[in-house]
Image (cartoon, helix red, strand yellow):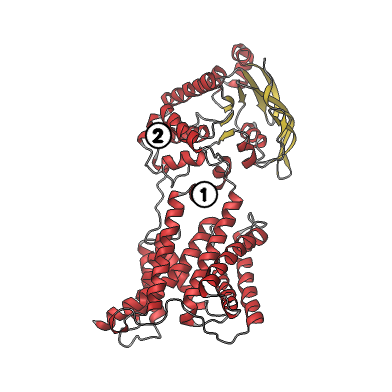
Amino acid sequence: MELILHQVLAGLATGAIYACLALAVVMIYQAIDGFNFAQGEMAMFSTFIAWQLIQWGVPYWAAFFATLVVSFMAGIIIERALFAPIHNAPVLSHVVVFIAMFAILNSLAGFIWDYNVKTFPTPFGSRPLLGNGLISSHDGGMIGVTVIMLVLLYLFFRHTRIGLAMRAAAANPESARLAGIRVAWMIALGWGMAAGIGAVAGMLIAPVVFLEPNMMASVLLYGFAAAVLGGLTSPGGAVLGGFIVGVIENLAGTIPYVGGELKLTIALVIIVAVLVVRPGGLLGQRIVNRV
Amino acid sequence: MSAPLLEARGLCAFYGATQVLFRLDLSVVAGGVTALLGANGAGKTTTLRALCGMVRTTGDIRLGGQPIMGRPIEDIVRLKVAHVPQGRGTFVRQTVAENLQIGAMSRRDHAAIATDLERVYGYFPRLFERRRQQAGTLSGGEQQMLAVGRALMLRPTLMLLDEPSFGLAPRIVAELFEIFRRLNRDEKVSMLIVEQNAALALDLADEAYLIETGRMVMTGAAATLRNNDSIRRSYLGY
């Protein structure tokens, strides 16, 4: 029983990271109807920027928020410079640029900061948080930050004009332009926010997986799985999907004879099974449209 | 006769290399209603799209004397031109109330927006009843009312209406055109209306243009076109 409880809590902690990344994936999916394969590498690059700032003696939280701002602006610049010009290009052109960005950011990070594994500090410490060390204070911090971010995003999209403008631009770009919404800027803003969310995910997971240019490879896969499982149209679903993927992955590891080797397989099998029953994902919106 | 609010000279439009509009001249008088008539594929919708820069266009377009040719649609909207598109442009996942807020997105005067929301609900009580419903669940007629309501949230001086009667029951159409009449009379909203239902449009309009495969074939007072039997039979089909 203790073992299962432990695995569930540990799963929630890693799930929080998948949730962050899934959130970023959903943000860009909403804006451009495509998967950003470079999302993980953008997050990794942001984390390196934070690491560099800390190395230069900047206090953790100052570095954290500076990285957030830099990533947000970089997201906007990447959209304006690379994706706005190919906005009407076929989807495969987007895929090629995503893959190119993946490779470029990966090698650039290796070039600037080399491939040696680095430690990354956590602001939450690594004390046991609940009795018997079931969950560390860093795990608790990760879950807390993810939940706070989701709540902030929810409030932003539901209760601000610009949030509504972004939703309108994603749902029906032409009609949004007819209402005077500057759709191109809304897409860029979505990219900026996604880059910021990704940066948070990177900075939270770096203390656990350690910092190096390939740190996000497996995390990104889980993040995608979480986004699809939760429903690509729903930020709440992305977070739910993240936690579910994290917990399933950890529980699968405890099944006798399966162990660590097949836990990824089991997690993905369960996800596929869910999608067969609910193709839109768990919370993906079913659009009712009368004609 | 007052000065033209909207005036286009030598308007041409292109889809890729294909020219679809050929040197159209047209104008909408401030406070007036102009009808743009023609058969399927004559270029009526394209004309509306050309006027607000949604297709590749050449020529001279002026709004209140100011050239607007080549300006992006988002800027033209800020000059109080509301385009009610064919197909209604409903934001199906958003609620009715959110759809109306979207219509006021280019405005900053929050107090006046709230007043205008009440005004739209006054014109369309049905939208008030359904304000919390997902807009995609509305009937075709209700979605057309929502499209007009969204346009009104801009507090427009000019409305471009693209086939507002399309696919609607006659009773709903009558209701809708009565509201257009009130908007024009009481609030001095100028209109350029594209319609297949010529009788309906000529009833509302002061002036009318008839186009055929992208060329202007007839202009004149709406009453003249309405009362000319040969025009009616050959072009308007009633």
Q: Residue at x 57, y 34 (%)?
A: B82
Q: Where does residue A135 sit, x and y in percent of width and height?
A: 34, 79
Q: Nearer the viewer, residue B223 or B70?
A: B70
- Decide: is B3 above or below B125: above
For the residue marked with disc 1, what is the amino acid? Ile
Mark identifier at residue A162: 1
- Decide: is A104 above or below A114: above
Q: Secondary structure at mark 1?
A: helix
Q: CA distance from mark 1 to mark 2?
A: 23 Å
Q: Which quadrant holds the N terminus of chain B?
A: top right
Nearest to viewer (mark 1 / mark 2) = 1
Lateral position of residue B199 relative to residue A9, left or right: right
Q: Chain of mark 2?
A: B
Q: Where does residue B134 sit, x and y in percent of width and height?
A: 39, 44
Q: Secondary structure at mark 2?
A: helix
Q: Nearer the viewer, residue A95 or A31?
A: A31
- Decide: is A119 above or below B47: below
For the residue marked with disc 2, what is the amino acid? Leu
Mark identifier at residue B127: 2
Q: Nearer the viewer, residue B15 or B152?
A: B152
Res A151 → quadrant: bottom left
Q: Chain of mark 1?
A: A
Q: Where does residue B196 sit, x and y in percent of width and height?
A: 56, 27
